[in-house]
Image (cartoon, grey):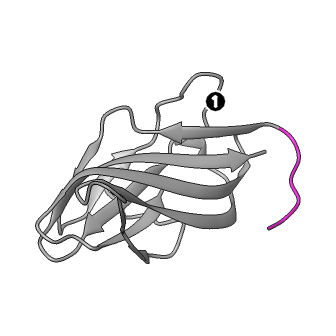
Amino acid sequence: MAQVTGRRGLVSNDTPATLSNAYTITKLDDVPDRATLIPGAAWLAHIDVVFDTIAGGATQATWYLCRDAAGDEPITDELSTTIVLGATDATDGGVSARIDRPYRPIQSDLGSIYVAMKVNNGGTANGTFELYWVE
């Protein structure tokens, strides 16, 4: 990963997204305490996804980051990640992935970024996303 110094932050979704075998597009615009929206240019570091209520045999999440609410302007490759299930509760779990790439938002939508995600096997899950960045 490139050595980057400066401000750091994260953006998330304030309400868990309901995921199924079709892509759900979720805007990451909630700013937890002491965090800020993605500035005009940033390095996207990694994403953490916490699932609750995993059902129907979902074992994998497929996702990408995008610039728009339709999911038509991807900024990362599509990635499939195995869901790590909770140690004591198999209906909870998560995925985590390193992104490690620069990002410059479109001028008309500064600070906005979306995640497109689906789960496999006809399953469902509720997902809360945290996208970490550095300036």
- State left or right for residue 79 relative to residue 85: right
Residue at x 70% of width, y 41% of height:
40
Q: Nearer the viewer, residue 73 or 10?
A: 10
Q: Is residue 13 above or below residue 126?
A: above
Q: Quadrant of residue 57?
A: bottom left
Task: Give yes or no for residue 4 being in the magenta stretch.
Answer: yes
Q: Is residue 68 visible?
A: no
Q: Main secondary structure of the magenta part?
A: loop
Residue at x 65% of width, y 23% of height:
34
Q: Nearer the viewer, residue 68 or 60?
A: 60
Q: The residue tagged with tag 1: helix, strand or loop?
A: loop
Residue at x 84% of width, y 65% of height:
2
Q: Write down the region rendered in magenta.
A: 1-6
Task: Give yes or no for residue 16 being in the magenta stretch.
Answer: no
* Amino acid bearing label 1: Thr
Q: How crowded is the residue under tag 1: few (<14 C-alpha within 10 Å), some, or many (20+)?
A: some
Q: Quadrant of residue 72?
A: bottom left
Residue 80 percent coordinates (x, y): 40, 77
- State left or right for residue 24 relative to residue 14: left
Q: Nearer the viewer, residue 44 or 120?
A: 120
Say which quadrant the N terminus sits in. bottom right
Name the residue beneath numbered marker 1.
36
Residue 64 percent coordinates (x, y): 44, 66
Residue 7 percent coordinates (x, y): 80, 37
Q: Is residue 7 visible?
A: yes
